[in-house]
Amino acid sequence: MIDFEGPRTVWEQVYEILRDRIVRGEYKVNHPIASQVQIVDEFGIARGTAEKIRKKLVQDGYVVTVSGRGTYVRPREDWNPQRSEEL
């Protein structure tokens, strides 16, 4: 659940939820994660916020975006998570 009034930003909270889904295997390797529209609808966030989250997931190596196709989970050995302070 997103805490819109808490000390952590909404995008940090959603990033962590999506990252945890990837780590737990809810999103399988080489399969797409939720689309930007699905993320916007599920969490009630702006498109720009969803894009920021996608970029951070790409930066950390969890996913790769294929133009015109979607965003796909990368193999675990490609993951390079940044420290949470860099969120």
Image: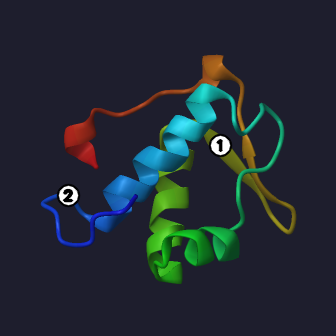
Give above or below for 6 relative to 27.
Answer: below
Read off the residue under disc 2.
8
* Residue visible at 48% across and 27% down in the picture: 80
In the image, which disc is placed on residue 6?
Answer: none
Query: In the image, residue 85 lies at what x, y percent?
Result: 19, 41
Near-viewer residue (21 or 86): 21
Query: In the image, residue 73 lies at what x, y percent?
Result: 71, 39
Q: Which residue lies most toward the right here?
A: 69
* Residue visible at 26% across and 72% down in the picture: 4
Residue 56 horizontal side relative to residue 84, left or right: right
* Residue visible at 63% across and 16% down in the picture: 77
Read off the residue under disc 1.
63
Name the element at disc 1.
Answer: strand
Residue type highlighted by circle 1:
Val
Give above or below for 75 relative to 55.
Answer: above
* Residue visible at 47% across and 47% down in the picture: 17
Query: In the image, residue 30 lies at what x, y percent?
Result: 83, 36
Name the image quarter holding the N terminus. Answer: bottom left
Which color scheme is applied?
rainbow
Q: Which residue lies most toward the left here?
A: 7
Q: Quadrant of residue 63?
A: top right
Mark 2 or 1, which is nearer the eye? 2
Residue type highlighted by circle 2:
Arg
